[in-house]
Image: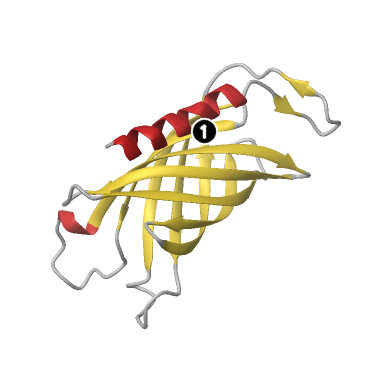
Amino acid sequence: MKRVILIALTMFAFIGTSNAQDTMDGSSVEKSGVDVYVAAGLSMSNTYDTTFAYASYPSIELGIMKNNWSLGLVAGRGNNVYSVKDDISNYWWEVKTALSFPVGKFSGYGLLGIGNYMSTKRMFIEYGAGFSYMPTDHIGIFSQVSNWDGTWYITPGLSYTF
């Protein structure tokens, strides 16, 4: 339990570092308001000697963004094998935070999350980095590499900001 509290405090410490957003010329501006977003991704790993369906999982995230900080609630399925009986043990949830920084036309970000498999009391952590690009004011494309419960994944995805 102490580990969970420590990770949660670290995640929320990112709030204090997100007071300003850098502009292209290096100055910073205050951005007011909170944006709501939804994102969907497909995480893929090359672990085990198995099929793509067993080594990948879909997820959906709903969250808020302010300046260069985001906090989201993620839910997903443990694999893409739908031919067997489906039950709650195939699903998980996670609270995830990210801190972003501008890199030219892109944004880089670091992420940290903590979650739980719905059928157990076992907690897991996720950490990693990625980049995103927003071709419009509302639609984004992202790719990230993260260690999720001890396994490395690459996750491409799409996001929509309201």
Compared across the picture, whether 94 is left or right of 155 comes to left
Give me the residue at 54% from left, 30% from top: 14
Circle 1: element type: strand
Compared with 140, 50 (above or below) is: below
Compared across the picture, whether 93 is left or right of 84 comes to right
Observer-nearest residue: 127 or 43? 127
Residue 91 lies in quadrant: bottom left
The N terminus lies in quadrant = top left
Percent x, y of residue 56: 39, 67
Judging by the rendered image, the residue that carries numbered circle 1 is 70
Observer-nearest residue: 64 or 109? 109
Percent x, y of residue 76: 32, 52
Give me the residue at 37% from left, 83% from top: 49
Residue 95 lies in quadrant: top left
Compared across the picture, whether 107 is left or right of 150 comes to right
Observer-nearest residue: 17 or 70? 17
Give me the residue at 58% from left, 43% from top: 139
Compared with 72, 131 (above or below) is: below
Compared with 44, 75 (above or below) is: above
Percent x, y of residue 155: 50, 59
- Give the residue at the far front of this rendering: 2
- Give the residue at the far right of this rendering: 25
Compared with 57, 34 (above or below) is: above
Give me the residue at 17% from left, 51% from top: 120
Percent x, y of residue 73: 37, 38
- How packed mark 1 is, by other alpha carbons closer than 10 Å (few <14, some 14-19, many 20 or more), is many
The scheme the figure's colours follow is: secondary structure
Q: Amino acid at mark 1?
A: Ser
